[in-house]
Amino acid sequence: MRKEFISSVSHELKTPISLVQGFAEGLKDNVNEDKESKDYYCDVIIDETKNMEKLVKDLLDLSKLQLGKFKLKKEKINLIDVVESVINKYKKIFNERAINFRFENNSREIYVLGDELRLKQVLINYINNALNHIDERKEISIKITKNNSLVRVCVKNSGNNISKEETEKIWDSFYKVDKSRNRKYGTTGLGLSIVKGIINLHNGHYGVINKKDGVEFYIKLSIKE
Ligand SMILES: Nc1ncnc2c1ncn2[C@@H]1O[C@H](COP(=O)(O)OP(=O)(O)OP(=O)(O)O)[C@@H](O)[C@H]1O
Ligand SMILES: [Mg+2]
Protein backbone atom coordinates (compact mmCIF):
# COMPACT_ATOMS: atom_id res chain seq x y z
CA MET A 1 0.00 0.00 0.00
CA ARG A 2 2.82 2.37 0.85
CA LYS A 3 4.49 1.74 -2.51
CA GLU A 4 1.24 2.50 -4.29
CA PHE A 5 0.83 5.66 -2.24
CA ILE A 6 4.31 6.97 -3.05
CA SER A 7 3.78 6.18 -6.71
CA SER A 8 0.45 8.09 -6.73
CA VAL A 9 1.95 11.14 -5.01
CA SER A 10 4.92 11.23 -7.39
CA HIS A 11 2.59 10.88 -10.33
CA GLU A 12 0.37 13.74 -9.09
CA LEU A 13 3.39 16.03 -8.66
CA LYS A 14 5.05 15.23 -11.96
CA THR A 15 2.76 17.24 -14.21
CA PRO A 16 2.52 20.45 -12.13
CA ILE A 17 6.28 20.50 -11.61
CA SER A 18 7.03 20.15 -15.32
CA LEU A 19 4.43 22.80 -16.14
CA VAL A 20 5.85 25.27 -13.62
CA GLN A 21 9.37 24.59 -14.87
CA GLY A 22 8.39 24.89 -18.52
CA PHE A 23 6.39 28.08 -18.12
CA ALA A 24 9.00 29.72 -15.89
CA GLU A 25 11.67 28.98 -18.52
CA GLY A 26 9.31 30.32 -21.16
CA LEU A 27 8.91 33.56 -19.22
CA LYS A 28 12.65 33.93 -18.89
CA ASP A 29 13.25 33.33 -22.60
CA ASN A 30 10.53 35.70 -23.75
CA VAL A 31 10.91 38.64 -21.41
CA ASN A 32 10.07 41.09 -24.18
CA GLU A 33 6.92 39.41 -25.33
CA ASP A 34 3.52 41.03 -25.04
CA LYS A 35 1.87 41.45 -21.66
CA GLU A 36 -0.96 39.08 -22.52
CA SER A 37 1.22 36.04 -23.01
CA LYS A 38 3.27 36.94 -19.94
CA ASP A 39 0.07 37.04 -17.91
CA TYR A 40 -0.91 33.68 -19.32
CA TYR A 41 2.46 32.14 -18.37
CA CYS A 42 2.16 33.54 -14.86
CA ASP A 43 -1.43 32.31 -14.49
CA VAL A 44 -0.38 28.77 -15.38
CA ILE A 45 2.40 28.90 -12.80
CA ILE A 46 0.06 30.27 -10.12
CA ASP A 47 -2.65 27.67 -10.89
CA GLU A 48 -0.20 24.81 -10.82
CA THR A 49 1.39 25.91 -7.54
CA LYS A 50 -2.12 26.18 -6.06
CA ASN A 51 -2.79 22.61 -7.16
CA MET A 52 0.40 21.46 -5.50
CA GLU A 53 -0.45 23.36 -2.33
CA LYS A 54 -3.87 21.68 -2.18
CA LEU A 55 -2.29 18.28 -2.75
CA VAL A 56 0.20 18.79 0.08
CA LYS A 57 -2.51 20.06 2.48
CA ASP A 58 -4.72 17.06 1.66
CA LEU A 59 -1.80 14.67 2.08
CA LEU A 60 -1.04 16.14 5.49
CA ASP A 61 -4.68 15.71 6.57
CA LEU A 62 -4.71 12.17 5.27
CA SER A 63 -1.48 11.21 6.95
CA LYS A 64 -2.71 12.62 10.28
CA LEU A 65 -5.98 10.71 9.86
CA GLN A 66 -4.13 7.49 9.16
CA LEU A 67 -1.73 7.96 12.07
CA GLY A 68 -4.58 8.76 14.45
CA LYS A 69 -3.11 12.22 14.99
CA PHE A 70 -5.99 14.16 13.51
CA LYS A 71 -7.43 16.13 16.41
CA LEU A 72 -10.96 17.45 16.28
CA LYS A 73 -12.07 20.57 18.14
CA LYS A 74 -15.50 19.27 19.08
CA GLU A 75 -18.05 21.79 20.26
CA LYS A 76 -21.81 22.00 20.42
CA ILE A 77 -22.61 23.75 17.15
CA ASN A 78 -25.74 24.60 15.21
CA LEU A 79 -25.39 22.57 12.03
CA ILE A 80 -27.89 24.81 10.20
CA ASP A 81 -25.54 27.80 10.68
CA VAL A 82 -22.59 25.74 9.47
CA VAL A 83 -24.37 24.64 6.29
CA GLU A 84 -25.76 28.12 5.61
CA SER A 85 -22.36 29.73 5.98
CA VAL A 86 -20.84 27.31 3.45
CA ILE A 87 -23.74 27.94 1.04
CA ASN A 88 -23.23 31.72 1.35
CA LYS A 89 -19.63 31.32 0.21
CA TYR A 90 -20.80 29.45 -2.91
CA LYS A 91 -23.61 31.81 -3.91
CA LYS A 92 -21.35 33.82 -6.20
CA ILE A 93 -19.97 30.74 -7.95
CA PHE A 94 -23.49 29.30 -8.38
CA ASN A 95 -24.58 32.58 -9.95
CA GLU A 96 -21.58 32.87 -12.22
CA ARG A 97 -22.05 29.32 -13.48
CA ALA A 98 -25.81 29.68 -13.78
CA ILE A 99 -26.40 26.78 -11.39
CA ASN A 100 -29.95 25.97 -10.47
CA PHE A 101 -29.48 25.83 -6.71
CA ARG A 102 -32.04 24.72 -4.10
CA PHE A 103 -31.71 24.62 -0.33
CA GLU A 104 -34.30 22.58 1.56
CA ASN A 105 -34.47 22.94 5.30
CA ASN A 106 -37.24 23.35 7.88
CA SER A 107 -35.26 23.89 11.05
CA ARG A 108 -33.54 26.88 12.53
CA GLU A 109 -31.47 24.99 15.04
CA ILE A 110 -30.10 21.46 15.04
CA TYR A 111 -27.17 20.97 17.34
CA VAL A 112 -24.38 18.43 16.96
CA LEU A 113 -21.11 17.83 18.74
CA GLY A 114 -18.61 18.54 16.02
CA ASP A 115 -15.62 20.37 14.64
CA GLU A 116 -17.05 23.28 12.68
CA LEU A 117 -14.07 23.79 10.37
CA ARG A 118 -13.79 20.10 9.55
CA LEU A 119 -17.52 19.73 8.90
CA LYS A 120 -17.29 22.71 6.57
CA GLN A 121 -14.39 20.97 4.83
CA VAL A 122 -16.64 17.92 4.28
CA LEU A 123 -19.43 20.03 2.77
CA ILE A 124 -16.97 21.93 0.58
CA ASN A 125 -15.66 18.62 -0.72
CA TYR A 126 -19.16 17.47 -1.60
CA ILE A 127 -20.09 20.77 -3.25
CA ASN A 128 -16.87 20.96 -5.29
CA ASN A 129 -17.44 17.42 -6.47
CA ALA A 130 -21.04 18.28 -7.39
CA LEU A 131 -19.79 21.27 -9.41
CA ASN A 132 -17.17 19.14 -11.17
CA HIS A 133 -19.62 16.40 -12.12
CA ILE A 134 -22.75 18.39 -12.88
CA ASP A 135 -24.44 17.85 -16.25
CA GLU A 136 -26.10 20.34 -18.59
CA ARG A 137 -29.18 20.60 -16.35
CA LYS A 138 -26.92 22.32 -13.82
CA GLU A 139 -28.92 21.39 -10.74
CA ILE A 140 -27.50 21.28 -7.23
CA SER A 141 -29.57 20.86 -4.11
CA ILE A 142 -28.65 20.72 -0.45
CA LYS A 143 -31.13 19.26 1.99
CA ILE A 144 -31.14 19.02 5.78
CA THR A 145 -33.49 16.48 7.36
CA LYS A 146 -34.06 15.10 10.84
CA ASN A 147 -34.82 11.51 11.66
CA ASN A 148 -35.17 10.61 15.34
CA SER A 149 -31.77 11.24 16.83
CA LEU A 150 -29.93 11.82 13.55
CA VAL A 151 -29.54 14.82 11.29
CA ARG A 152 -28.79 14.22 7.63
CA VAL A 153 -27.23 16.70 5.22
CA CYS A 154 -27.04 15.82 1.55
CA VAL A 155 -25.62 17.44 -1.55
CA LYS A 156 -27.16 16.34 -4.81
CA ASN A 157 -26.17 17.21 -8.36
CA SER A 158 -27.78 16.43 -11.67
CA GLY A 159 -25.44 14.14 -13.58
CA ASN A 160 -24.42 10.58 -14.32
CA ASN A 161 -24.86 7.80 -11.80
CA ILE A 162 -21.82 6.13 -10.26
CA SER A 163 -21.57 2.36 -10.84
CA LYS A 164 -22.14 0.16 -7.80
CA GLU A 165 -18.55 -1.03 -7.77
CA GLU A 166 -17.26 2.52 -7.88
CA THR A 167 -19.54 3.80 -5.10
CA GLU A 168 -17.29 1.82 -2.76
CA LYS A 169 -13.92 2.64 -4.33
CA ILE A 170 -14.36 6.43 -4.48
CA TRP A 171 -13.81 6.66 -0.70
CA ASP A 172 -10.24 5.33 -1.12
CA SER A 173 -7.41 7.81 -1.54
CA PHE A 174 -6.37 8.66 -5.10
CA TYR A 175 -9.34 6.86 -6.61
CA LYS A 176 -10.88 8.70 -9.55
CA VAL A 177 -13.51 7.25 -11.82
CA ASP A 178 -12.51 9.33 -14.80
CA LYS A 179 -8.76 9.92 -14.70
CA SER A 180 -8.83 12.48 -17.52
CA ARG A 181 -10.99 14.90 -15.51
CA ASN A 182 -8.23 15.20 -13.00
CA ARG A 183 -6.08 17.61 -15.01
CA LYS A 184 -9.00 19.71 -16.04
CA TYR A 185 -10.26 20.36 -12.51
CA GLY A 186 -7.01 20.04 -10.59
CA THR A 187 -8.35 17.22 -8.45
CA THR A 188 -6.38 14.35 -7.00
CA GLY A 189 -8.87 11.85 -5.61
CA LEU A 190 -8.21 12.58 -1.93
CA GLY A 191 -11.35 14.56 -1.02
CA LEU A 192 -13.69 11.70 -0.19
CA SER A 193 -11.08 9.74 1.75
CA ILE A 194 -10.69 12.83 3.95
CA VAL A 195 -14.49 13.10 4.26
CA LYS A 196 -14.58 9.47 5.36
CA GLY A 197 -11.85 10.08 7.99
CA ILE A 198 -13.50 13.23 9.37
CA ILE A 199 -16.98 11.70 9.59
CA ASN A 200 -15.64 8.55 11.23
CA LEU A 201 -14.02 10.73 13.90
CA HIS A 202 -17.49 12.23 14.49
CA ASN A 203 -18.96 8.71 14.83
CA GLY A 204 -21.21 9.64 11.94
CA HIS A 205 -22.23 8.02 8.67
CA TYR A 206 -21.45 9.01 5.09
CA GLY A 207 -22.40 7.63 1.71
CA VAL A 208 -23.66 8.14 -1.79
CA ILE A 209 -26.98 7.22 -3.37
CA ASN A 210 -27.69 7.10 -7.07
CA LYS A 211 -30.88 8.95 -7.95
CA LYS A 212 -32.97 8.91 -11.09
CA ASP A 213 -31.43 12.14 -12.36
CA GLY A 214 -28.16 12.44 -10.47
CA VAL A 215 -26.15 11.47 -7.40
CA GLU A 216 -26.60 12.38 -3.77
CA PHE A 217 -23.76 12.42 -1.23
CA TYR A 218 -24.77 12.57 2.43
CA ILE A 219 -23.53 12.67 6.00
CA LYS A 220 -25.49 11.75 9.13
CA LEU A 221 -24.59 12.92 12.61
CA SER A 222 -26.11 12.41 16.05
CA ILE A 223 -28.22 15.30 17.28
CA LYS A 224 -27.04 16.82 20.54
CA GLU A 225 -29.95 17.95 22.71
N1 LIG B 1 -20.91 14.21 -7.51
C1 LIG B 1 -20.21 13.25 -8.14
N2 LIG B 1 -20.66 12.70 -9.30
C2 LIG B 1 -19.97 11.74 -9.94
N3 LIG B 1 -18.79 11.24 -9.51
C3 LIG B 1 -18.29 11.73 -8.37
C4 LIG B 1 -18.96 12.76 -7.62
N4 LIG B 1 -18.20 13.04 -6.54
C5 LIG B 1 -17.12 12.24 -6.61
N5 LIG B 1 -17.16 11.45 -7.70
C6 LIG B 1 -16.13 10.46 -8.11
O1 LIG B 1 -15.38 10.10 -6.99
C7 LIG B 1 -14.00 10.36 -7.22
C8 LIG B 1 -13.31 10.67 -5.92
O2 LIG B 1 -13.78 11.90 -5.40
P1 LIG B 1 -12.83 12.74 -4.45
O3 LIG B 1 -13.55 13.93 -3.96
O4 LIG B 1 -12.24 11.79 -3.45
O5 LIG B 1 -11.62 13.13 -5.42
P2 LIG B 1 -11.52 14.26 -6.52
O6 LIG B 1 -12.68 15.18 -6.46
O7 LIG B 1 -11.23 13.59 -7.81
O8 LIG B 1 -10.20 15.04 -6.03
P3 LIG B 1 -10.02 15.97 -4.75
O9 LIG B 1 -11.31 16.00 -4.00
O10 LIG B 1 -8.92 15.35 -3.99
O11 LIG B 1 -9.65 17.30 -5.29
C9 LIG B 1 -14.00 11.48 -8.23
O12 LIG B 1 -12.79 11.54 -8.94
C10 LIG B 1 -15.17 11.08 -9.10
O13 LIG B 1 -14.76 10.10 -10.01
MG1 LIG C 1 -13.28 16.03 -4.52
Image (spheres, helix red, strand yellow):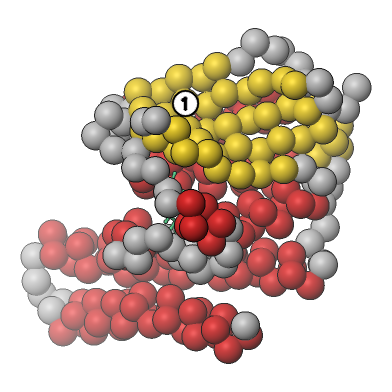
Viewer-proximal residue among 212 and 153 = 212
Q: Residue at x 57, y 80 (%)?
A: 5
Q: Nearer the viewer, residue 215 or 105?
A: 215
Q: Residues within 10 Å of mark 1 (few under 14, many from 20)?
A: some
Q: Position of residue 3 (x, y in %)?
A: 58, 89
Front residue of this view, candidates 134 and 187: 134
Viewport quadrant of the N terminus: bottom right
Residue farthest right in this picture: 225
Whether residue 77 is visible: no
Provide the residue designation for mark 1.
141
Q: Quadrant of residue 152?
A: top right
Q: Where 195 falls versus 37 (above or below)?
A: above
- Image: 42 above or below 91: below
Residue drawn where x is 85% and y is 36% of the image: 113
Q: How many labels does the image show?
A: 1
Quarter of the image that includes the C terminus: top right
Locate residue 20, reporting x and y percent. 32, 77
**Rendered position, 187 above or below 49:** above
Quadrant assignment, res 222:
top right
Residue type of the residue flagged with mark 1: Ser
13 left or right of 41 in image:
right
Q: Residue 17: where, in percent of width, then height?
A: 37, 80
Q: Which residue lies furthest to the bottom in this view?
A: 3
At x 50% / y 85%, what residue is drawn?
7
Q: Decide if residue 73 is on the left or right side of residue 89.
A: right
Q: In which quarter of the image is residue 191?
A: bottom right
Q: Residue at 31% of width from left, 82% of height from top? A: 18
Residue 70 relative to residue 30: left or right: right
Tell me where residue 102 appears, x and y as whole percent. Answer: 45, 20
